[in-house]
Image: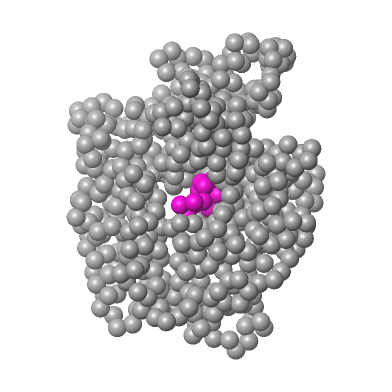
Amino acid sequence: MNKISLNIGSTVYFENKSYVISKHISAKELLAKESEFPYEFKVLKIVTLKANYDNKQELDIGLVDDKSWEIAKKRYQTIESLLVSHKTTQADYKKVAEVSKISVPTLYRWVSSYSRTGTLSSLLPNYKDRGGANKSRLSSEDEKIIESVIEDKFLNPQKYSVTVIYRDIVEKFTNAKMKVPHINTIRARIQKLDPKLVTKKRDLEKVNDTRGMPERNPRGKFPLELIQIDHTPLDIILVDEEDRKEIGRAYITLALDIFSRMVAGFYISHEPPSFFNTGQCILNMIMTKDDFLKYLGVEGEWPLYGIPREISLDNAKEFRGIDITRFCEQYSIEIDWRPVGRSHYGGHVERFFKTLGDEIHTLPGTTFSNITQKGKYDSQAKAVMSIGELEKWITEYVVNIYNKKEHSSIGMTPEEKYMEGIFGIGNYPGTGLPPIVENTKSLRLSLLPSVERTVQKNGITIDHVTYYSEVLRKWIYPQNSRTKARSKLFICKRDPRDISKIYFYDPDIKEYFEIPYRNITNPKINLPELRKTIAKIKEDQGNTSSLDEYQLFDTYKKMKAIEESSAVKTKKARRDESSKKYLHKKLKTEVPKKLNNSFPKIKKQKEKSPEPRSIEVPKLFNFDFIEED
């Protein structure tokens, strides 16, 4: 994913011509001048622009070893002061060179590499074809064994010594007929451990992460400097889109810009909070919102988009993970882990949830906040809204009400505050339009959950499902190959909404390839359906050690047949089916426009299939409030 700078004076490309940005004329358009004769001015829409850097290879940051990643982070810290302004001089470079002991030409090269893409991976050391002292000499298998022993023996209240730990590592490597690493390698791994984690595991002492912390997060002085992200269940019972029977509540994951109090993005799902939900919220935040609003049929403007400088997350397990951490490091997004026990540290997004909840309590089917408020109100009987209708309602509320109502803590509407921060007012110059994302495919893939798998003779197998394509053939080792015993692990991305295909990262070509089911006649299913089927087989057989793909999909078909033949489906079955339809519909909108122009199809389908009911979705424009901080 390349970031396209929209700063005044930056060069961008439109229809194979280069332009120099002259003025920002709106949140969606800018005035630019041709770089070559006849040097004409042109108004350009920012969503149509291309970057002044063509990088056809995609680097999967999940494949980068920790040592190389740390080197890239240190390089970024070294040149960070040189990236702040375009007016840096040679004297500035010499000053940094003296402090860092890095040569000036090297600093120029690092700044140039980072400026072209705006990604941390551009600063990774390139050891290919030349070796070097910093090159990792350990395979991923070696690292896994070392990590396991350190986790088991060093991070242990028994406080085993390095000598004892190394003895265990020697035994395991010898049994596996692998080359034993030097004891200094083990000492280096231990020295890199987080001191707080070591104290917690070895000394069994609680570490107070809130010492020295201010009562409130002091950042948020300009647009996209700090984004708070959190999720909550919504206080409303939803119904299936077709039979209109109740299916329970949904969850929302939401991002809020602290400077302007504007909602930066959100994602609604029947599934509980997870990394995927968080990733989809971040995706909605970064992308421009035109297509999203058009798909939902919402009239209005939602100008906030772009990659933030910092995101504030709580310590829930769905936020803690290598995927989300690597994504943020790749695009220079700092993570602010909210201190344990200080919920008010994320109070802005919590306050919005309360405001949104108050408005949802006016909708039919609300569960209210507690039993006292609910009284004798029958939420199930009153429920009329599907998850798609609720998504549209919330979007309408965010775009045309919340963003356009005065917020008491900033003295203006969130939208006015955001535009003031972007374009400036008086002596405040504004930050200018944020960069847009050019390679949306790479962005979407980086926010999907990843797994590591080997390529076997029949393809790649994940959760008893096998995938195959000719792309994998070169990675299938012959039966007599010596490397077969230690087959290479590959990164595979899988979308939980549709597991009929995976995205395989080829480390040679540095691109992702779509790999379908080996048996393409198998039905498309989502990840919850797969897990439910595996759980059913385990319940019937006691284990899944002998489970094959045929039995898996045969059981799935039988379970679906039983559900469809039932006179009355259970609420959970209705919920699962409704969730599948909603996610499939959302997935369609993510296909690139040139491959699938989905909006006319959706509109046409709605015209042909009128609603089989006469229930009106609740109207929005009946609120009169001032948001409190």
Q: Position of residue 19 (x, y in %)?
A: 51, 27
Measuring 78% from the left and 56% from the top, which residue is drawn there?
411
Q: Is residue 87 left or right of residue 463?
A: right
Q: Quadrant of residue 59?
A: top left
Measuring 20% from the left and 30% from the top, which residue is drawn there?
478
First to last magenta residue range: 278-292
Q: Position of residue 10 (x, y in %)?
A: 57, 27
Q: Position of residue 628 (x, y in %)?
A: 75, 63
Q: Quadrant of residue 551?
A: bottom left
- Residue nearest the observer in this picture, 466 or 522: 522
Position above or below: 88 against 499: above
Q: Quadrant of residue 352?
A: bottom right
Q: Position of residue 456 (x, y in %)?
A: 25, 38
Figure quadrant of the C terminus: bottom right
Q: Is residue 88 left or right of residue 130?
A: right
Measuring 29% from the left and 74% from the top, which residue is drawn there?
563
Q: Please indicate, yes or no, whether residue 29 appears anywhere in the rendered image.
A: yes
Q: Is residue 371 left or right of residue 220?
A: left
Measuring 69% from the left and 62% from the top, which residue is drawn there?
405
Q: Is residue 329 left or right of residue 590?
A: right
Q: Main secondary structure of the magenta part?
A: helix
